Image (cartoon, helix red, strand yellow):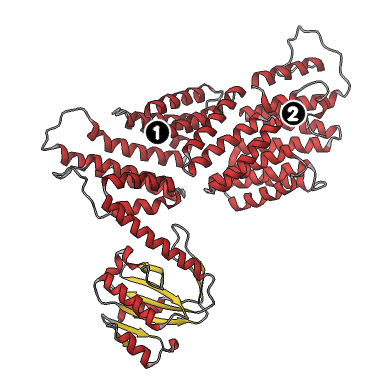
Amino acid sequence: MRPLDPLDGMSPLSRLLRSAPGAEVRAELDRIEALLGEGGEGGAPAAAPAAPPLPGGPLLAAALAFGRGALALREGALDAAVRLLDGAAAAFGEEGAAEARDLARCEAVLARLRRDARSACASAVAELDAIAGAGDGGRRAAVVAAHYRATAERIAGDAAAAQRTLLSALRGSEPFLDERAQILNSLGTLYVTLGAHGAAEALLEHAAELHRRRGDAVGEAIAYGQLGAAALGLGALERARAALQRQEWLCARLGDAFGRARALTFLSELALELGRADDALALATSARDIAAGATPPLRTWIAYAARAMGRARRDLGDLGAAAALEEAGALFRELGHPLGEALAAWDRASAEALAPVRSTTPVAPVVQPATTVQLATTVDWFSAAWALGSLGLPSRVALLLRERIEIQEEAAPRPGNGEPVSDGGIRERALAAAAQTSPHVAVQREVELVYDRPDDLTVVAAHRAAAHRNLARLAALTLAPPGLVVAAIAASGVNVRGLVLPSERAAAACIAHLPRLAVWLWPSATAPAVIGSDLADLRTALGEPLRAALALAPAGRVLCPPFAGDVGAELEAVEVGALLALAESLAPGELRLDAQLGWNGEVGASVDALGFVVTR
């Protein structure tokens, strides 16, 4: 028996909890309480005549308590939710309704997790494990317990454990489509936080459809909210807007202040991304007012809405934007919210950098360029970028780098031709590398560069093409039979990163790069003349003699190419430390061959003919 089953013949409460505004649910709860002839919280006025007791009174009272607890949990009144749900669980237990008791216990545990966060995780896992292990593992309560156990693991910061538990719960949810939809919501949300936006989108689209079929507007709103976040992560701005608008509409119908404030804040951020600062300001103001009007006030969303308002004011040229963003940052600090604090610090840096550029106060022409450049370059961009990077958010760092470049270009004086001064593509390459996880950011910047600085775009594109080619070769080498030829290369020009990647004509792949040092490798079946030719091409590209030490790794293998931001490929049976030290000790132009290579004198002569001094 489910906790609300005793009310099925007399009330649509189960449906109302899924799809009706809180006021309508509360009115129905009061009606049921009046029918039960009970006083108490939210009941009929004392002067109202008592109705005769209904059959099954204790179970009905337990179901009523559960309904009130479920509404309190939905509305974020967590102290009341814990009290009511604990009471319902005890009442069901006294009546021998074990399944209803365990489901009420699960909801009480969830309320404690939301209220107490990490401090409740250990006890929550213990209680949920006890519930899951107390009977048939295929019953509904066991599935719900596994689902909420994953919530505890996610809150505790163990994403891998949360994923395993959710997938296990998903397998067990086949008979319970309502629980399955909720689990899909949680799994999709987890993947959003992990940055697996494609997987999240697929799961959440399924969840939204299941919720819609069941008439569960609450679950559907949650699914659409996370769909919007996933679409933003994929750079699909129109899909994101449609999903967030759907969430806002559903939450408005439900009277869900939390969901509305969240959706409106995300929509304001989206408007800023699309260059509509006036729309963003209106949306963020609405979000702040809704969050502030909730009981209790939704302080996290007040802070995020205040941040969006400050950003909109900055983009509209309001010189008070930096102060507004400082207030948002202070609220994030008070809440102990490192992501919000880092984002507000970034926004404040950009507002401070733009203030002297956009100021309407007249400044003497001779002083303005120097003052502008100084203010734009002394702003503390690093602290915000480092905080965002430490939170594992390269896409945010990429956006910060793009914004900094744009502000510096707006602030910096230009030569007589009016074109921005190029730094040889250094900043643009840094941005392109950071944007590897956010293709939409890279695409937007490329469109800007093709008109403003096509030479820098060429530098970025060439470097990226070489990096992609190197990545593809390393991936292909995971299929090669064991055996690698390894070359440690030393030269001052190796410090120019783009030059050290093997060319299109080469047969090598680069696995490591440090100042003045690099490591290349080839399949062991590669002809010595090809290896020598590759090194000769690198020498030409660097414009200086190389020092290189070559060795055979007979069992060497590439196990995995690097992920974006990873350091080098994952290798097996390849040692490079001593080889790098040896390369550093060689004379310019010297090529030291390991005897294990088995290259005879004729082969050595052919390599020598390429301009190297071959030693053994």
Dot 1 amino acid type: Leu
Q: Position of residue 3 (x, y in %)?
A: 78, 31
Q: Position of residue 207 (x, y in %)?
A: 65, 39
Outermost top residue:
47
SS under mark 2: helix
Outermost bottom residue:
601
Query: Which of the 4 image quadrants contains residue 355?
Result: top left
Q: Position of residue 291 (x, y in %)?
A: 51, 25
- Within-10-Å neighbours for mark 2: few <14, some 14–19, many 20+: many
| Location of the C terminus (image quadrant) | bottom left
| Location of the N terminus (image quadrant) | top right
Q: Nearer the viewer, residue 112 or 531?
A: 531
Instruction: Decide if residue 585 is on the left or right side of residue 221.
Output: left
Task: Give the residue pinned by disc 2.
Answer: 66
Q: Nearer the viewer, residue 465 or 501?
A: 465
Q: Taking 317 as reference, is 541 above or below it?
A: below
SS under mark 1: helix
Q: Position of residue 136 (x, y in %)?
A: 82, 47
- Within-10-Å neighbours for mark 1: few <14, some 14–19, many 20+: some
Mark toward the viewer: 1 or 2:
1
Outermost front residue:
505
Instruction: Decide if residue 555 is on the left or right side of residue 26.
Output: left
Task: Give the residue pinned by disc 1.
Answer: 272
Q: CA distance from mark 1 to mark 2?
A: 43 Å
Q: Nearer the viewer, residue 346 or 572?
A: 572
Q: Residue at left 37%, top 33%?
A: 275
Instruction: Decide if residue 150 is on the left or right side of residue 285.
Output: right
On the question of residue 565 being in view, the answer is yes
Q: Are marks 1 and 2 in contact (CB under 8 Å)?
A: no
